[in-house]
Image (tube, rainbow, N blue to C red):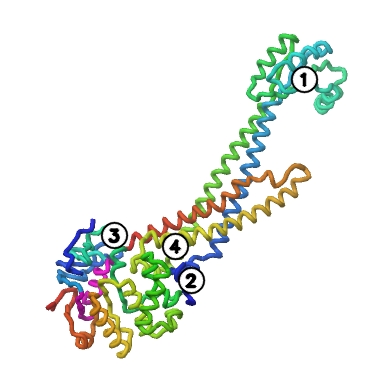
Amino acid sequence: MRHEASGRGDPIGLRHALADRLLIALIAAMALLAALTVGLHQGVARLADRWQEGANAAVVVQIPNPTQARMDAALEVLRGLPEIREAQVVDPLRMAELLRPWLGDVTGLPLPGVIELRLADLGTDPVLIGDRVAEAVPGAVTEAHGIFVGRLAALARAFSSTTLAVLALVGFISAAVVIIAVRAGIAARRDAVMVLHMLGATDRDIAGRFALRAAWLAALGGALGIAAALAVFWAAMLFARPFLPDLGWQVLPWPGLAAIPLLAMLIAWGAARASILVWLRRLP
Amino acid sequence: MARSCETHLMVRFGRVGLAYPTPQGSPGRPALHDVSFALGEGSFTWLLGPSGAGKSSILRLMHAALRPSSGVVSVLGTDIGQAERGALPALRRKIGVVHQEFRLLGHISAWDNVALPLRLAGRAEGAIRQDVDEILDWLGLREKSARPPAELSGGEQQRIAIARAIITRPALLIADEPTSELDVFEARRLIALFGEMNRLGTAIVVATHSEDLPARHPARIITLAEGRIIDAP
């Protein structure tokens, strides 16, 4: 039969009633926004972790009157502590270079010796380390100057949390778009819906047809949106590669990106079903 | 809960009143007043009366497309006024309906229109094909079954609507002005078809404003005027 296939699968005529191109395009735009937000979320979260690690690890021990004996004694104590992964004396010439912008030529100044530490355990209290060193080398001072970096990391984490709110907003707008499309579909196919209702179709059956169609269009839109996002990520990587040579596809949040079309499907399915069920409740 | 009624009666109206709600939701002008009658299994009934007499309202109540404002409407053992909403689709599937304006789906073929009630009932495609082909053969429309309704004549569309209404072999068939869009020849053919179905056991209720049709096919006549039964032997 010439029309049998469409009659079996689509008696309401939803292929023409639900504005497929417009809905796909809108969902694709939402998916693109969601993918970029997921990428931003992951990038900022990683940055926050890196900053936090730097803040925790950047501990410096200053040794006044840095004779070789005092420096060796301090290093011996520090390298014997299990909490410390690495202890390195900062080259006095490098110190002089670092201070030059503020103090000018520091060759004649009595600068302390500086030992830079990397902690094995980021939870270690730097004050305790300072106390141990000061026992062996009187006057030694420990300074954990990661407070500022820690605040930066906290700020980054807060920003990362707001991306979740943006994702929720994108989901809400997607649901609203689907509901508007379904209402337009009902208006366009009201007669067909009424005929199915008259012939004994259940609300679940009618709503299921709308929901499946909306979910299918949302999946297509979601996939297109992800494809567009990958193009954006690729372009961003090209720009960033000179500064971040290790940057590659492996850094992308693949599970999150893969979930976007599925979430778009679920949102569309739920929104369409709820919308048509509410409308059908008006009928006897 | 649906209340079980007398099983030997297909339809029972007991002092039924109906008022369509206004757009504001309040009850509007009454369309039916104190309507009472009963239809038995295998009966053939004409609902006769002018436009606005209440014929369509009675048919819509029979098909559970409306609930009564007062009184009792019992169809195939289900109290329409009291039945839960979820119980009504199953009841509607047991009733065949033919409308004056056919109400066929224009984007699918005539064949698919006829198959629709079976698909909604969850029948397997193999069983559907045989039943649909058989009924289209009986109605002389097999050759044109692949066409969309718009490519068929008014009489052919009406026969497709009838095929759709009876494909599930309903115990009750209701028809609202089924001949108003047909020429005299097609109208006579349609009434003969109803008579044949009635002989096969289907209870039939036909609403019409034409007195010619009951004259050609004598059966019980319920006459309505202004929402009241004025004659019901």
Nearer mark to the viewer, of 1 and 2:
2
From this viewpoint, is residue B71 visible? no
Q: CA distance from mark 4 to mark 1?
A: 70 Å
In the image, residue A61 sits, relative to residue B59, either above or below, namely above
Q: CA distance from mark 2 to mark 3?
A: 30 Å
Residue holding disc 2: A5
Q: CA distance from mark 4 to mark 2?
A: 15 Å
Residue holding disc 1: A115
Magenta span covers which residues? B42-64
Residue holding disc 4: A209
Circles 4 and 1 on the same chain: yes
In the image, residue A37 sits, relative to residue B150, either above or below, namely above
Sort mark 2 into few (<14), some (14-19) or many (20+) by Cα contacts within 10 Å.
few
Q: Tag 4: residue type?
A: Arg
Circles 3 and 1 on the same chain: no
Q: Please identify the quadrant where the C terminus of chain B is shown.
A: bottom left
Identity of the residue furthest to the bottom in this view? B185
Nearer mark to the viewer, of 4 and 1:
4
Q: Quadrant of residue B106?
A: bottom left
Q: In the rendered structure, are the residues bearing label 3 and label 4 in contact, judged by CB atoms less than 8 Å apart?
A: no
Q: Tag 3: residue type?
A: Ala
From this viewpoint, is residue B62 visible? yes
In the image, what residue occupies the spot 27% across and 74% down?
B173
In the image, what residue occupies the spot 41% across and 82% down?
B142
Residue B82 vs residue A271, the one in the foreground: B82
Please tell me whether residue A215 belongs to the stretch shown in magenta.
no
